[in-house]
Image: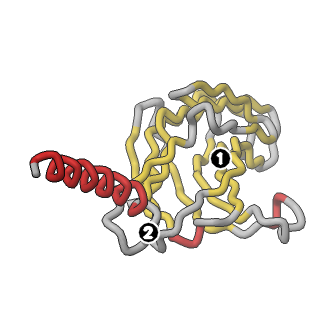
Amino acid sequence: MMNRSLKLIIALVIALSTLTLLTSQWPWGLAQSQEINLIDNKYTWKPFRDAIISQNQSNLHIVVVTNNTDKIYNRAFLPVQINSALNKSFNLNLDYASQSTKGNATFMAQIRDNTSQVANNSSSKVLSLIPLKNTNGQLSNESFTIPSKIANRPLELRLYVITNGPGEHTLTVKKASLTIP
């Protein structure tokens, strides 16, 4: 009798742990939140225009030094797809420091549609636009709610340093993560 009870308890524990793993994918389950670290080694950010990027496991550093007098949308961008069976909004969590040592810049984050129907990079549909502060080099922690429509489609995440004349600017991201509540 004791042996049978022990087997039932073990079977119950295994069933509950399997259920816990499965509910993270079921919209009706008791899912725990998932966090996706967007600057770890699984993701490689790419530069555009005058942006120079360095990236490691815990840091994305964007430097823009320009003599251009036109308005330039310098950026780091990341092609990615976030898959989720849940129809919930996401939280974008950013720990960042931005600074303009010479000139002025506007800092911004953006999420764009990156499907094959988009003819070129400049005409892709903006799904979310997030203004970032010029923190004068001080670390800032901000969270933004992103609509669920970003799920299950090719995306491009962009971190902009927009210049409108000569200058030197930095955007350092210590944390960039999407949380699915």
Residue at 65 percent of width and 39 percent of height: 43
Where does residue 159 sit, x and y in percent of width and height?
63, 46
Residue closest to the eye, 137 or 167: 137
Residue 122 sits in quarter: bottom right
Which kind of residue does numbered mark 2 sit on?
Trp
Residue closest to the eye, 108 or 78: 78
Residue 138 sits in quarter: top left
Residue at 70 percent of width and 45 percent of height: 77
Where does residue 86 sit, x and y in percent of width and height?
47, 70
The image's colour scheme reads secondary structure
| Camera sees residue 144 | no
Crowd band around label 2 with a 10 angstrom C-alpha radius: few (<14), some (14–19), many (20+): few
| Camera sees residue 125 | yes
Q: Which residue is mark 2?
A: 26
Which kind of residue does numbered mark 1 sit on?
Tyr
Residue placed furthest toward the left:
2
Where does residue 123 sit, x and y in percent of width and height?
81, 66
Crowd band around label 1 with a 10 angstrom C-alpha radius: few (<14), some (14–19), many (20+): many
Residue 45 sits in quarter: top right
Q: Marks 1/2: CA distance? A: 35 Å
Residue at 49 percent of width and 64 percent of height: 146
Vertical order, 132 against 76 (above or below): below
Vertical order, 85 against 165 (above or below): below
Q: Earlier in the sequence, mark 1 or mark 2?
A: 2
134 horizontally vs 31: left or right: right
Q: Which residue is mark 1?
A: 160
Vertical order, 100 against 21 (above or below): above
Residue at 77 percent of width and 32 percent of height: 66
67 horizontally vs 39: left or right: right
